[in-house]
Structure formats: structure tokens, C-alpha cells
Image (tube, rainbow, N blue to C red):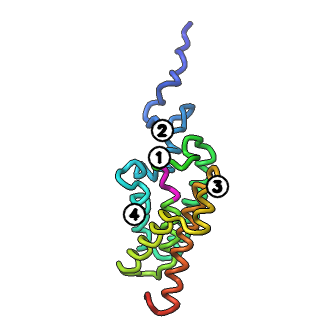
Amino acid sequence: MGEPAPPSPALPPAGLPPVLAPGLSAAPLPRLVVSLGGIGHLRPAPGTWGSAAVLPAVLLGPEACLILAALLGLLGWWVLERLPAARQDPSWVVIDEGAGQALALAALPAGAGAPGIILAFLLFRLFDITKPGPVGWADRRKGAAGVMLDDILAGALAGAIILALRAGGLLP
């Protein structure tokens, strides 16, 4: 008779935001992750916004871009496996663009200038939108792997072209 009622599961414990409250639906947090903090909800062209979001990583150098690509790729795949609403690659899912763009940026040298960054951005977006060869094949895969893989391959193609241009002396 003297014991207080347990807290309502509909309300988060005091001081915790609803997204992090224990026992509540975790759906907002995975959606926040795969939309890169909500960037995927920007219009027009959410994929372009998602790609642009990782461009500052180039300032940290190629190793950091490669690590970022790997982290975004693994995190994206892991979250997408647990978020059925995102498995058909809705436009608000842009973590895949972030991973692919970071991979393309990893091909640039430390201290890369604006021309190299712009080239990496444009090549990645070109391959992500037109989906040539293996990018198109990956895009036709189902589930989380398909969502992530096409953008990772687009980033790898963009990176390969940048590395070839650097090896040929056409890009610093």
C-alpha cells in the first residue's frame, strides 16, 4: 500500500532524452544513424547532402577517411539489418553515401586542395547516380548489403580513378 507505482514506460526517466531512454523503442536512434543525424531528410537530393556531409573528413588525411568509410560502412550495415523500414534504400538513408564518399576521399593525399576534393565528390556522385557495372549489380542486391555495397563500390571506383590520375601525374 505504501509502495509507489513503477514509472510509466511511455515516459523516459528524468534527465534522459526519449531516444536514449531505457526500455523505449530504439527506432528513432537507428533512423538518426542511417540518416546521418537527419541529413537524409534534407531536400532536394538527400544523397548529395549525405555525401557532402563527410567532405570535411578530408582535412584529417587519407587514413582518417579510410577509417571513416569503414566505420560508416559497418555501422550502416549493422543498423540496416535491424531497421526493416530502411532495407529498401529509402532516400532518407544516406549513411551509405557517407561511406562511399569517404572511401573516394581516402584516395586523395593529405592536404588535398579544392580541385581534388571536388573531383572526388563529382566522381562519386556520378557513379552513385549512374550505377555503372558492379555498382548497378550491387544496387540490385536485397537488404542491408545491397543498400551499402553499391555506394561503397561507387566510392571505390571514384578512388581508383583518382589514384590513376595521381599515378599519371595529372592530379597532385
Relative vertical location of residue 156 with respect to residue 87 in this rendering, above or below: below
Rendered-image quadrant of the N terminus:
top right
Residue located beneath label 2 in the image: 19
Name the amino acid type tagged 2. Val
Find out whether the residues at labels 3 and 4 contact each other: C-beta distance under 8 Å: no
Q: Which mark is residue 52?
A: 4
Find out whether the residues at labels 1 and 2 contact each other: C-beta distance under 8 Å: yes
Q: Which mark is residue 141?
A: 3
Alpha-carbon neighbours of circle 4 within 10 Å: few (<14), some, or many (≥20)?
Answer: some
**Mark 4 and mark 2: span between their CA atoms?**
26 Å
**Mark 1 and mark 2: span between their CA atoms?**
10 Å
Q: Which mark is residue 93?
A: none
Relative vertical location of residue 41 with respect to residue 132 in this rendering, above or below: above
Residue furthest to the bottom: 169
- Residue range highlighted in magenta: 92-96
Question: Residue at 48% of width from left, 30% of height from top?
Answer: 13
Relative vertical location of residue 25 with respect to residue 149 in this rendering, above or below: above
Residue located beneath label 1 in the image: 32
Camera-nearest residue between 91 and 53: 91
Camera-nearest residue between 136 and 159: 136
Camera-nearest residue between 130 and 7: 130
Relative vertical location of residue 104 with respect to residue 50 in this rendering, above or below: below
- Give the left or right position of residue 152, taking residue 112 as reference: right
